[in-house]
Every structure is written in structure tokens, then in C-alpha cells.
């Protein structure tokens, strides 16, 4: 009985972890604040980077459903209609926004390698 309960618990935990998806929503202008209509479906938080451009939002999907995200961009407020189905997010009214799963960056995104120790030593001296 304990073995069956343990297997069932592991299956439930693994399917929950596999379901949760995180997305990055990138704005073409800085974001002041983000509000979610129904936080039982997803959560959204602005991402502050080192250069403090405030153009990215991290979205964590919790379950399927429909909700809206209110994005305050200093000079305007935009409502993004969001639909989650089978763990995939679709956004309507996304003019001025790009979004993609954190696990899968968009095609053509160049990720540069870290500098070599020789290059770092030259820039310090």
C-alpha cells in the first residue's frame, strides 16, 4: 500500500511540475506595473534587469483558464486577454508585446558566450 501511494504521489508531482510553464513577455516600452485579474490561473511580475529597462514580464502559468493582465506602461494601460489551454498561453491584444516560453527562446535570438579570461584581463587593465 505504501509503495502504491508513493508511486501515485510521484506521478502527481511530476505531472504538476511538467504542466507549469513560465513565459517572458517583452514590451516595446518600459513597464511600470502589472496586475492579473485572476491569480489562480497565472501570476505576472515585472523583471528588473541590470540596465533597469523594465521591458520584461515573467508569467507563471498555474492552470488552464481565461484571465486578463493589466500592463501599466507609464503613459498608458493595456489589457492583455490571456487564454491558457493545455499549459500553452495565447495572448490577444498583444500589439507592442512579444512573448515566448522561457524554456524555448524565439528563433534568431543570439545568446553570446561569456568573455574569455584573456579578454576580461585586457578590459580590466
Image (cartoon, rainbow, N blue to C red):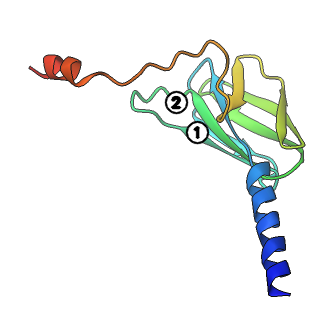
Mark 2 element type: loop
Q: Which one is in front, 70 or 99?
A: 99
- Where is mark 2, residue-wise? 54
The quarter of the image holding the C terminus is top left
Q: Is residue 27 left or right of residue 110?
A: right
Mark 1 element type: strand
Q: Residue 91, how many percent across, how many down?
A: 83, 29
Which residue is found at the position 78% from the left and 52% from the top? Answer: 62
Within 10 Å of disc 1 (Cα), the crowding (few <14, some 14-19, many 20+) is many
Q: Height in image: 125 above or below 5?
A: above
Q: Label 2 to label 1, Cα distance in Å?
A: 7 Å
Q: Quadrant of residue 76?
A: top right
Which residue is found at the position 76% from the left and 38% from the top? Answer: 69
Residue at the far left in the pictured view = 125
Q: Height in image: 108 above or below 73?
A: above
- Where is mark 1, residue-wise? 46
Q: Height in image: 53 above or below 57?
A: above
Q: Height in image: 114 above or below 48?
A: above
Q: Which one is in front, 38 or 72?
A: 38
Within 10 Å of disc 2 (Cα), the crowding (few <14, some 14-19, many 20+) is some
Q: Which one is in front, 14 or 86?
A: 14
Q: Are marks 2 and 1 in contact (CB under 8 Å)?
A: yes
Amino acid at each position: 500500500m505504501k509503495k502504491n501511494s508513493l508511486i501515485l504521489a510521484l506521478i502527481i508531482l511530476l505531472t504538476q511540475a511538467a504542466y507549469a510553464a513560465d513565459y517572458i513577455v517583452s514590451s516595446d516600452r518600459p513597464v511600470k506595473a502589472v496586475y492579473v485579474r485572476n491569480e489562480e490561473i497565472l501570476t505576472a511580475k515585472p523583471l528588473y534587469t541590470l540596465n533597469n529597462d523594465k521591458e520584461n514580464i515573467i508569467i507563471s502559468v498555474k492552470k488552464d483558464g481565461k484571465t486578463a493582465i493589466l500592463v501599466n506602461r507609464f503613459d498608458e494601460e493595456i489589457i492583455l486577454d490571456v487564454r491558457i489551454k493545455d499549459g500553452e498561453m495565447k495572448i490577444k491584444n498583444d500589439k507592442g508585446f512579444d512573448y515566448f516560453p522561457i524554456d524555448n527562446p524565439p528563433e534568431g535570438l543570439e545568446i553570446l558566450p561569456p568573455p574569455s579570461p584573456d579578454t576580461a584581463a585586457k578590459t580590466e587593465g
